[in-house]
Image (cartoon, rainbow, N blue to C red):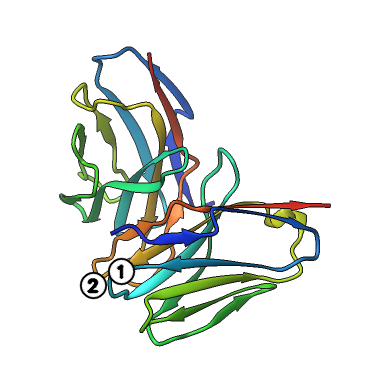
Amino acid sequence: QQPVQSPQAVILREGEDAVINCSSSKALYSVHWYRQKHGEAPIFLMILLKGGEQKGHDKISASFNEKKQQSSLYLTASQLSYSGTYFCGTEQGGSEKLVFGKGTKLTVNP
Amino acid sequence: DGGITQSPKYLFRKEGQNVTLSCEQNLNHDAMYWYRQDPGQGLRLIYYSQIVNDFQKGDIAEGYSVSREKKESFPLTVTSAQKNPTAFYLCASTNRGYNEQFFGPGTRLTVL
């Protein structure tokens, strides 16, 4: 079952914050977050495991609410380089395969 | 440098022809994956392989075939049975467990 991402698109000015959400109707083992620039390969950002763990990477952090089967990606003080499409990938039942959402397109303007 | 290579970057084929997309990795990863990406659809799993000589269908396997004869290589064949093959194809690999997937640069296939 494909996870649902929201919003579909967001436009920011440099320095503003954003939150991208990912929700699933299935119980999740883990959630992966990736960023993709147009025409390029997705780049790994972070993995969150069940247990409500929160992780951070520079000014990008994420949380995982196992009970609600939801994950959120937080981008703080956005930079121009943050522009791209963000995908969450969810792993269900220890299957070792990911089901990706449709993506959230983030545009950061000067 | 370790990584994943996909070739070619752009591929054009006539309708009704089979075509094979290459994916090679030198990361010593056990698991490899093929995804298809269409505008607005995210990444959809075609096939994946967790060990050599074994592979499983993903969500959209119809019209595709794969082989995994070597740990480093996981070629994908797009057959004439695939109704709408024009898309961006991404290959990925990972160590088994809760590890990140490393993606290749992709092959953009256009069927004329």
Residue A91, given in percent of the width and then of the height, sits at 32, 67
Q: Earlier in the sequence, mark 1 or mark 2?
A: 1
As displayed, is residue B26 above or below residue B7?
below
Indicate whether B1 appears above or below B65: below
Q: Relative to the observer, which residue lies in front, B5 or A80?
A: A80
- In the image, taking residue A83 as reference, residue B62 lies left or right, namely left
Q: Are marks 1 and 2 in contact (CB under 8 Å)?
A: no
Marks 1 & 2 on one chain? yes
Q: Which residue is found at the position 32% from the left and 50% from the top?
A: B33
Left or right placement of residue A101 versus residue B96 in this view:
right
Can residue B29 be seen in this snapshot?
no
Mark 1 belongs to which subunit? A
What residue is shown with label 1?
A: A25
Residue A37 falls left or right of residue A70: right
Q: Amino acid at mark 1?
A: Ser
The residue pinned by badge 2 equals A93
Q: Label 2: chain?
A: A
